[in-house]
Image: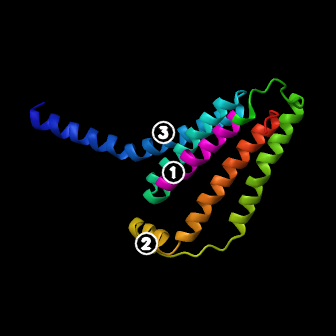
Amino acid sequence: MNLADLLSLAAAASAKIGAYVPDSIFLAIAAATITGALITVLSRSIIYAMMGLVLTMFGIAGLYVYLDSPFLAMMQILIYVGAVTILIAFAIMLAGPMYRHPEEWSGIIKFAGALIVSILPFIFLYKVLIRTDWIKGGVSEFGLTTKEIGRALFDKLTFPFELISLLIVVAIIGAIMLALLSKGEK
């Protein structure tokens, strides 16, 4: 075996490995998303559940990047991972320590209810997918770029942006007032 044979063998192995890289990336992102969702649902600590939710949201952002949609990925990170997670953390902090845990249902009832609630949407979605008459044809390219979307948001939709920021400020002030009133302070 000479050097040319070794190089051709290495190139063939590299091509085989390179063919599996996109699949491996997708599986890693999907595994992170599902792991975060399981941590969120199965955790007994609300802080760990929030961290699992953050992992799930990052995984979804990763799926958006994998689907070649960087704008949606950045909006997922900015809005959900950033803002919503911070609001959840504030809600946890304002609620204070939970000395009395609510009584939970018995194990079998909880499991059966969760199973029914989980399976019904999949059955409905399956029926909709089977009964839908899908249009077959080429995929048209989406004409907007991230720059055009950003320009439209800040040129034409400035007022709704300001209203959303005002709503967030009012919600934060309301949460602080509720926390102070529940502690007996005025």
First in sequence, mark 2 or 1: give its number. 1
Q: Quadrant of the N terminus?
A: top left
The residue range painted magenta reads 73-93
| Residue plotted at (73% across, 53% down) | 122
Of residues 20 and 168, the one nearer the viewer is 168
Q: Is residue 109 above or below residue 82?
A: above
Distance between the alpha carbons at the discs numbered 2 and 3? 29 Å
Query: Label 2: which residue?
Result: 144
Asked where in the image residue 8 lies, by quadrant, the reply is: top left
Q: Secondary structure at mark 3?
A: helix
Is 31 on the left-hand or right-hand side of 18? right
Side of 169 where 119 appears, left or right: right
Asked if residue 144 is positioned above or below residue 127 in the image, the reply reads below
Q: CA distance from mark 2 to mark 1?
A: 20 Å
In the image: residue 141, left or right of residue 183: left
For image coordinates 42% across by 70% down, the residue present is 151
User: Residue 130 location in percent, x, y?
Assistant: 70, 65
Q: Position of residue 110 (x, y in %)?
A: 85, 35
Q: Quadrant of residue 36?
A: top right
Identified by mark 2, the residue type is: Leu
**Residue that mark 3 sits on:** 28
Foreground of the two, 94 or 2:
94
Marks 1 and 3: in contact by CB < 8 Å?
no
